[in-house]
Image (cartoon, grey):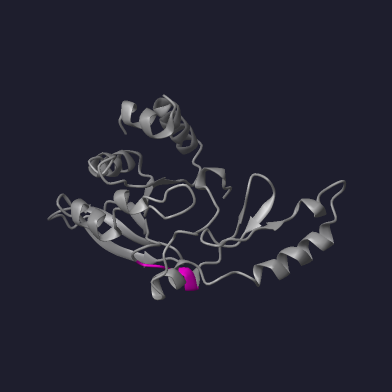
Amino acid sequence: MKKEKFKKITGFDLLSKVIEGIDYALSLSMPLKVNTVILKEVNDDEIFDLVDFARERKVELRFIEYMPLGGNSDWERYFVSEKEIKEKIKERYELLPLRKEKIAGVYEVREKETPFSSGQKIGFISTISNPFCNSCSRIRITSDGKIVLCLFDKKSYDIKAFLRPFIREEELFNFIRETVKLKPEGYIKYKRESLTFEENSFLVMRKMGG
């Protein structure tokens, strides 16, 4: 939420443009969630600023734990857990559990000592401290046309062959169906077997699609 810090993290002086984009999306009544990653001694002093930003706009805020993916071998230095973020928020607000989704726990943020619902929601996606691999059904497509079944996988599956020089739709559908069956166990395996991340995922998050 701070201009100079945003520029340092992203390399671009575009905080105002991002906020304009969020506000424009909300003006169109688009369903919207705003994701944020809290990093120790980087933006962990902005938790309340982020919560208040979301409350003012009545948009759902989601805190995503920092993950040990390709390109961030020193991830533990910056890691802040769901528990730590909740403890900070509870200094000022109450967090009331609303629901548990496949990948997120969702809470209502409420002013302390008030019976009235605020309608403001905060979600936590906590891959590291509370793995949800057994219920995750997500796959991703990279910017260079590969299916990735899990952010912690070391494999990807190329779909370009089914799109060039022409689209082979039925073959593509069949390929995707069979590929999805190969979805690996995910981060929960690393945690259960106390594996290290020295040879972890080849993925760099900024190159991923949704």
Q: Which residue is painted at 68% across and 53% down in the image?
A: 146
Residue occupying the far right of the picture: 165
Foreground: 122 or 83? 83
Q: Quadrant of the N terminus?
A: top left
Whole-percent x, y for residue 14 in the image: 43, 26
Q: Nearer the viewer, residue 76 or 92?
A: 76
Residue 94 drawn at (x, y percent): 20, 56
Q: Which residues are magenta?
A: 130-134
Residue 131 position within the rendered picture, expressed as x and y whole percent measured from the top left: 40, 68
At 84% from the left and 51% from the top, the residue drawn is: 167
Q: Is residue 113 shown left or right of residue 103?
A: left
Farthest residue, direction front: 198
**Is 168 positioned to the left or the right of 127 in the image?**
right
Q: Residue at x 49, y 41 (%)?
A: 29
Q: Can I make out residue 119 in this image?
A: no
Q: Quadrant of residue 34?
A: top left
Q: Give residue 102's position: percent from left, percent from top.
A: 46, 67
Give the side of residue 110 with respect to residue 21, left or right: left
Task: Based on the picture, tell me whether residue 146 belongs to the magenta stretch.
Answer: no
Name the one closer to the observer, 173 or 159: 159
Q: Is residue 141 visible?
A: yes
Quadrant assignment, res 192? bottom left
Q: Determine the main secondary structure of the stretch shown in magenta.
A: loop
Query: Along the line of sight, which residue is nearer the eye, 9 or 209?
Result: 9
